[in-house]
Structure formats: structure tokens, C-alpha cells
């Protein structure tokens, strides 16, 4: 939201580049895909720092969504129209040796916007908060004026709480956010009501439904519904209170000015240069970009100023597609139907920004959620030849009229009759409010399908992912991607909107920082108090006669010591769990160690004498453990070489406290052990689980299995939560990690284990499955090899059953230390 992020983030970019390349930053070649505001700011900052920057833009002019269209001989701004947080651009220009005021003419707005609910019901908000308070008092009475003052104070508090740890942060998780604010700031986090919708929170300040509509509209600033967006979006009120400016020539002119400055600082901008693919080499990451005409632009870093949906859809190649998470249609932000016209207006006194509200706001968003255009729409009108003067003009003026629309331009383009009905409803609403518009020939209408053509793979969504639910902002992609050397810039990859959001994303997009977890494992993941993280590998030999499981735990979820630890310090309960199965060796190691035994960074973790290390192509596991209660050595090396990584992380509970990433479902593996003496090859599975609280608090049991298929693997994960709800995941992945469709299998009964009678169950195509071998039979956990059928193929799945109710049994807790000894260091 804040342009200050752009300043801070770009400094991080330059620091990291120098850290990786010494002082030879000029040797770094950067290709920026797209000349939207995010790409332009990234290009400017990086070029000014001395990097060799080339911007590739498929259109004939810069700006991206900051665009204008011709209408009857005039250029009408067809993108963002609100310019806030001027000081951030001032800092960007200043750091690049320029003065914003010398290049851009800005005029402060005294009227932020005019709002209407009919011909005789209108309310202006002003740059002067006292003027707004007086207007609200006159419009709705002293109680609502008091509510407005309390609302403004809360909006300022929300902004102050989030500005440093969240808005500036590089895609923080909820846990990161809690750590950054510290114990003293947790009260502030709770006061900003992250779990309350914006609409619900507004009811605490305003009884007048019109004022709830007015301030609820802030959700649409990021393409969301006030009935689903979190209350934290009230911070927009504080941002606007700091000033709104009119840009002479419009925001498309601002984009052109930044493009000129970037070129002055050494960047090259090539227009009508369409990028067909991001070039990738195994082991190196990005090496450049390939243009549609066959030319390759060599680059050490690529900054994609494109919607993440375009990368995820494969528009820049399959390797780049795996670097980001896809955005499903139901998670997209709103699109729009816009009319850009040169027209004569009469009747209602327009100012630069005027909003005409629907008579039924809830129904409007219900229709949008259902995929329909609203029958009674809210309409935004930007009168671009006006400022604060609402006097009638005696000439045609430039108008942008906008109605919210569902982002289904890719799946279900609107029919001409639907667009015609939308225009009819628009004119009817304006007429009811007393405004008459007579457009000259040349009106330009853009619908979701039109925005999809401009910004492919988005469905016409104008703001990336919708901000629905308290976790939504954490799901927006950050600058870092899974592909080494590829970064994202743009408003759809951060929390924000319009020009300011794009500039924020620009600096995040320019960061050649450490790896994202999407390109491989990260071992420096933060772990909350009472939380856990583990990295899991299981493998079977080619002949099916040998197998192993390895789990590296921080906050060992199966530890009797962690269960009794009142401090709930996960770092004091670290374990390397090793289990060997086979005809020649069956061994179990699970020695717990304290925090002094843990050494880790982004690429490796060591717990005592054993560890995991990732070098970009190979996961190397070194083991030196001892079994219990009868001691015997397990020592050797395992090397796993993933063919690719999956893009999807799955939340296992409704609140997002427990996450699972099946990183590499099927990879070749080499096992070489000195003790016992074993050497074999086969296939392996690699994943990670990460949670913010104890498993037993949220789950009662689960079953899981994975099976190798001819061209990849299948995974079934069935979870039973404490509240009785179920989650059943049926997944299929190609060998390179790409997601594939799979027919949901049927429930299949399995016999319990022989000794501990541990319950087992699974699913298969025909509802039938059998146990080939039981690897582990414990009071609360079972691991087995099954015979089954999945997605039409006969398979031998590795299967596990876990009962957290059994784990909590006092007798089980008493027995566990005999198999799980503890060492302090």
C-alpha cells in the first residue's frame, strides 16, 4: 500500500546484488518484462544502480494498466485515476537524481470524491478531515459524525500497526507478522480486527447504511467485496487523508515520464517486443528471455512485471509456470465494464471523482459473486477535465464510467446483449441521480474479455487475487519466485492498487534475494512457539525389497518431551527420525536433541551428527544415528535429485495454521549406507509440513499415501479435524511437478495392524485395496505398503495412518521415551 515499500525494498535489492556479485553490479544483465508502473520503477532503480537493464514491452507505449484510449480525438485515461502518497514518488525520483516537481505537474485535490444515492442525496469527502466531519454531520447527524471521527482514528491505528511489519515486509506469513510486531504489538494486531469483514467492522462506527456503503467501497480499491474483505482495509481512509493529487496529463503521462527517466539512467526500453518464454537452464535458473520473433535476450535476472496468473498459466514457458501459484477463477479480484467517452454532461454537478451507489449493495456483490453483472450497479465516474469545480461545462468533456464485473473474461465472455443491458442499467442509474450524458461518436467500451486480451490469463481481473478473508493478503505472491533469478513486480503481486501498488511491487520485483521455497526446500523457515516444521523423505528400492523414511523435525510433533514442555519452545525439541525397512535391515532411530544441536540456514539443516543439504539440484542427506532401545548404528548418505517441484501448498485446517507442501512427489534416489551395509537405487518422495500450533489441538487423525505412476505420482491425504470436519485431497503430479487431474478414488477398507490394532483406511478406484507389508506398527502410527488401483493404474502405495488421540494417551506417552531417547545437545 505504501510507496515507502518501494524505497526500502529497492535498497534491499541493490544490497543483495552487491552481496552476490561484489562491486561488479554493472556486469548483471536484467531483463524486465513489461513497462507497467512496476516494471518501470524496477528498471529505473536498477539502471540507476549501474545494472544493465532492458525493458521489453509488447505494446507501443509504456504504462500497462496506466493507459489511455482515444475517444473522438481525445485521450481518455482508462486505468488508475487516483494518485496518493506523493512522497514515495518524491523519494524514488530523488534517489535517482531527479526532482518529481520538475517533471510532473501535481495539483492537490480539496474534494476527494462526491457520493450520491439519488438526485437529492449527496455527500462530499474532503482532503480536510474537519470539513468531512462537518459534511457527515449535516448529511446524517452528530452520531454519525462521532462515528466518523472514531473510524478515522482506528484507520490511522491500523495503518500504523501494519505499515512497518506488513506493508513493508517481503510477503510475511501470519507467524512472521506476529514475530515482527513482538509481544508488545500483539494487542495492536488484535485491535485491527483481522478476522472481521470490513462491512462488519463499519457497523461499529456507522448506523447509516449509506456511510457503510461509502467506506465499504474501499474494498473495491483492490477488487474485493466489503462483505468478504478484512476490516484492515479501512487503512485506505488514512492513506487518502494524507492527500490526493491530480496529475496533469493523467497517470499514463506519469508512466511516460518514469520511462524517460529510466532511459536517461541507462535502461533500454523496446516497444512491440513480445516475450514468448523465459529461458531457463537446469542448475542455473533463468538465462534470459526469448521473444516471439525468435530473438534471445541474455539476462542474469528477469523481473516479470506481469500478472502472476500469466506466469502460472504457462504464457512464459512451462519452467516459469512452476515458479508461482496459479490463481483459480473464484479467487480472482473484480474486473469491470468501462466506457471511455467524450461527452456532454448536464444535471448532476460532477467533480473529478463521483460515485453513484447501488440501492442494494449486498445484492450487487451477491450477483458479482454468482458471476453476473449487477442489475443495480454502483457506478464510478471520473470527469477528467474537472478538478474541484462542479460548474457546468459548455463543451464535451472526457469521462470514464466504470461498473464492477466478475472476472470471467476467459471462461465466459459476456454476450453483446449482456453488455447492452449493463449500459442500459448504467444510464438508468445516472438518470435517477439527475445526470444526463450525451456521448459523441467514438465511445470505447472494455469488458472483462477485453481486459483478458490486454492482460492474458487473468480473466480480466484488474488486481490479481481478491482480498477475501484474513489470509488472502498472505497468499498474494511476493517478489521471490521458485525459479532462481526470476522476480515479480506489479500491483497484482503485492497488497495495494493502482499506480502506488505497482510501484511497491516494482521494488519487490527487483530483489535478487535468496531462494524461494518454490525452487527447492528452505531450511530457515521461522517456527512459532508451540509450532513445528518437518522435512520428510520416503523411498523404495527399484525391486521393492528395501525402503526408508527420514524426517527432520524442529518441534517434534511425536515427542513426549515437547508435549510436556510448558515453554513450548520448538527449537529445544529437534529430531532426525530414521527408519529402515527391508529384508536385510529394519532399524528405527529417533533421538531428540536440544537447541544447541541445531545448525541451519536457507540451504541446509543439521541436527546433531545428521543433516540435510540442498545445492540447487540435489538433496543430500547424511546420517549418523543410533537405534533405541537396543543400540545399533545407522550411518551413510542418501542423494535425491528432484525432476521438478510442485507449485501448490495446501492448508490442512480452516484457519491456515497447518500447511503442507508436497515438494517433489517422485524423484530418483541413491542410498549408500555403511551401517548397515546397503546400497540401492529407487524412487523417493519429498515434502514438508509447517504449523503454528500443536497438531493434536486441531486434528484427531489422518491417513496419507503416495504411489508412483507411469508418468509421475498420486497422493491421497485424508484429514479429520477436531471439529469433526474432513478434508480429502486427491492429487496427481507429473514427474516435473506439474499438477494433473485425477478421478477422486472411492473409500477402501483395510485391516488394522496386527499387534497394536492401529486403524487403517485408504481410497482406490474400485474401493478395494490390500496390505502387502506393514513397515511400522506402533500404538498411534502405522506405515504400510499397499496394493491398489489409482487413476486407472495398478500401484503399490506407501501408506501411513496417524491417530493423535492415541498419541495423547498417558500410557503411550509413558512408553515413548524408550524408543525416543533425549540428549540435551
Image (tube, rainbow, N blue to C red):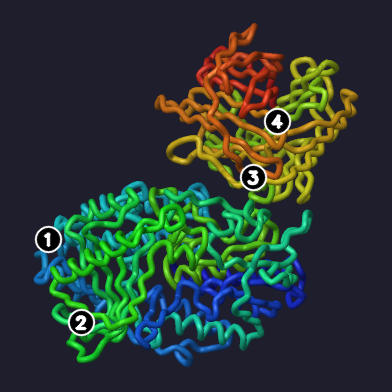
Q: Are marks 3 and 4 in contact (CB under 8 Å)?
A: no
Cα–Cα gap, marks 2 and 3: 54 Å
Disc 2: which residue: 345
Cα–Cα gap, marks 1 and 3: 57 Å
Q: Which of marks 1 and 3 is nearer the N terminus?
A: 1
Q: Which of marks 4 and 2 is nearer the N terminus?
A: 2
| Dot in front, 1 or 4 | 4
Residue 509 place in picture, x, y as percent: 59, 66
Is residue 254 left or right of 12 when viewed as pictured? left
Element type where label 1 sits in the image: helix
Residue 75, by quadrant, is bottom left
Q: Earlier in the sequence, mark 2 or mark 3?
A: 2
| Residue 738 marker | 3
Disc 1: which residue: 143
| Dot in front, 1 or 3 | 3
Q: Residue at x 13, y 80 (%)?
A: 347
Disc 4: which residue: 708
Amino acid at each position: 500500500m505504501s510507496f515507502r515499500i518501494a524505497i526500502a525494498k529497492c535498497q534491499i535489492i541493490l544490497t543483495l546484488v552487491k552481496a552476490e556479485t561484489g562491486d561488479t553490479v554493472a556486469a548483471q544483465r536484467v531483463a524486465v518484462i513489461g513497462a507497467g508502473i512496476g516494471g518501470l520503477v524496477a528498471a529505473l532503480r536498477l539502471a540507476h544502480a549501474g545494472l544493465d537493464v532492458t525493458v521489453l514491452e509488447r505494446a507501443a507505449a509504456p504504462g500497462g494498466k496506466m493507459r489511455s484510449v482515444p475517444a473522438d480525438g481525445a485521450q481518455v485515461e482508462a486505468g488508475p485515476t487516483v494518485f496518493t502518497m506523493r512522497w514515495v514518488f518524491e523519494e524514488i525520483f530523488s534517489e535517482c537524481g531527479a526532482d518529481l516537481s520538475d517533471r510532473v505537474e501535481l495539483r492537490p485535490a480539496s474534494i476527494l470524491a462526491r457520493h450520491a444515492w439519488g438526485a437529492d442525496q449527496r455527500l462530499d469527502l474532503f482532503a480536510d478531515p474537519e470539513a468531512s466531519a462537518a459534511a457527515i454531520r449535516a448529511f446524517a447527524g452528530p452520531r454519525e459524525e462521532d462515528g466518523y471521527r472514531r473510524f478515522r482514528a482506528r484507520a490511522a491505528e491500523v495503518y500504523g500497526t501494519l505499515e512497518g511489519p506488513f506493508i513493508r515486509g517481503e510477503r510475511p506469513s501470519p507467524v512472521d507478522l506476529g514475530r515482527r510486531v513482538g509481544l508488545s504489538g500483539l494487542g495492536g494486531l488484535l485491535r485491527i480486527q483481522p478476522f472481521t469483514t470490513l462491512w462488519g467492522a463499519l457497523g461499529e462506527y456507522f448506523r447509516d447504511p449509506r456511510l457503510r456503503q461509502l467506506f465499504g467501497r474501499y474494498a473495491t480499491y483492490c477488487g474485493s467485496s466489503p462483505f468478504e474483505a478484512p476490516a484492515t482495509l479501512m487503512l485506505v481512509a488514512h492513506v487518502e487523508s494524507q492527500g490526493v493529487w491530480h496529475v496533469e496529463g493523467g497517470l499514463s503521462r506519469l508512466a511516460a515520464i518514469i520511462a524517460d527517466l529510466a532511459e536517461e539512467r541507462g535502461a533500454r526500453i523496446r516497444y512491440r517486443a513480445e516475450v514468448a518464454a523465459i529461458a531457463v537452464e537446469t542448475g542455473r535458473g533463468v538465462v534470459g528471455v526469448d521473444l516471439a520473433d525468435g530473438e534471445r535476450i541474455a539476462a542474469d535476472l528477469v523481473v516479470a512485471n506481469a500478472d502472476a496468473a500469466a506466469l502460472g498459466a504457462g504464457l512464459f514457458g512451462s519452467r516459469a509456470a512452476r515458479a508461482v501459484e496459479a490463481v483459480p477463477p473464484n479467487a480472482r479480484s473484480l474486473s469491470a465494464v468501462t466506457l471511455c467517452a467524450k461527452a456532454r454532461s448536464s444535471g448532476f454537478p460532477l467533480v473529478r471523482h463521483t460515485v453513484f451507489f447501488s440501492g442494494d449493495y449486498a445484492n450487487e456483490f451477491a450477483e458479482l459473486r454468482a458471476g453476473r453483472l449487477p442489475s443495480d450497479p454502483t457506478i464510478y465516474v471520473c470527469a477528467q477535465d474537472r478538478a474541484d469545480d462542479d460548474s457546468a461545462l459548455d463543451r464535451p468533456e472526457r469521462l470514464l464510467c466504470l461498473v464492477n464485473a466478475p472476472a470471467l473474461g476467459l471462461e465466459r465472455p459476456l454476450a453483446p446483449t449482456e453488455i447492452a443491458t449493463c449500459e442500459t442499467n448504467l444510464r438508468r442509474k445516472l438518470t435517477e441521480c439527475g445526470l444526463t450524458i450525451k456521448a459523441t461518436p467514438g465511445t470505447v467500451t472494455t469488458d472483462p474479455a477485453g481486459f483478458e486480451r490486454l492482460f492474458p490469463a487473468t480473466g480480466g481481473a484488474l488486481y490479481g487475487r481478491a482480498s477475501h478473508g484474513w489470509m488472502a493478503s498472505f497468499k498474494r505472491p511476493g517478489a521471490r519466485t521458485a525459479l532462481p533469478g526470476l522476480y515479480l513486480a506489479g500491483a497484482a503481486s503485492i497488497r495495494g492498487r493502482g499506480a502506488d501498488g505497482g510501484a511497491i511491487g516494482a521494488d519487490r520485483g527487483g530483489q535478487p534475494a535468496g531462494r524461494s521455497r518454490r525452487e527447492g526446500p528452505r531450511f530457515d523457515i521461522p517456527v512459532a512457539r508451540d509450532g513445528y516444521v518437518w522435512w520428510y523423505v520416503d523411498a523404495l528400492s527399484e525391486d521393492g525389497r528395501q525402503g526408508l523414511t527420514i524426517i527432520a523435525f524442529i518441534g517434534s510433533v511425536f515427542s513426549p518431551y515437547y508435549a510436556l514442555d510448558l515453554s513450548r519452545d520448538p527449537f529445544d525439541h529437534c529430531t532426525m527420525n530414521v527408519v529402515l525397512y527391508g529384508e536385510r535391515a529394519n532399524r528405527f532411530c529417533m533421538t531428540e536433541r536440544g537447541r544447541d544441536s541445531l545448525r541451519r540456514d536457507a540451504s541446509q539443516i543439521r541436527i546433531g551428527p545428521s543433516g540435510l543439504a540442498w545445492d540447487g539440484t540435489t538433496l543430500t542427506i547424511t546420517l549418523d544415528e543410533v537405534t533405541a532401545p537396543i543400540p545399533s548404528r545407522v550411518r551413510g548418505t542418501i542423494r535425491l535429485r528432484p525432476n521438478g517441484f510442485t507449485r501448490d501448498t495446501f492448508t490442512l485446517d480452516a484457519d491456515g495454521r497447518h500447511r503442507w507442501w508436497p515438494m517433489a512427489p517422485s524423484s530418483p534416489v541413491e542410498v549408500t549406507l555403511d551401517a548397515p551395509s546397503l546400497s540401492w537405487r529407487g524412487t523417493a518422495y519429498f515434502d514438508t509440513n509447517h504449523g503454528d500450533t500443536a497438531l493434536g489441538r486441531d486434528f484427531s487423525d489422518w491417513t496419507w499415501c503416495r504411489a508412483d505412476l507411469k508418468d509421475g505420482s498420486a497422493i491421497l491425504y485424508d484429514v479429520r479435524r477436531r471439529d469433526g470436519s474432513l478434508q480429502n485431497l486427491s492429487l496427481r503430479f507429473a514427474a516435473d511437478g506439474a499438477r494433473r487431474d485425477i478421478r477422486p478414488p472411492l473409500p477402501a477398507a483395510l485391516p488394522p495392524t496386527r499387534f497394536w490394532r492401529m486403524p487403517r483406511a485408504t481410497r482406490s478406484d474400485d474401493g478395494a485395496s490390500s496390505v502387502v507389508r506393514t513397515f511400522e506398527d506402533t500404538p498411534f502410527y502405522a506405515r504400510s505398503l499397499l496394493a491398489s488401483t489409482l487413476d486407472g493404474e495398478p500401484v503399490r502405495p506407501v501408506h501411513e495412518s496417524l491417530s493423535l488421540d492415541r498419541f495423547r494417551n498417558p500410557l503411550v506417552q509413558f512408553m515413548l521415551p524408550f524408543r525416543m531417547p533425549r540428549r540435551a545437545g
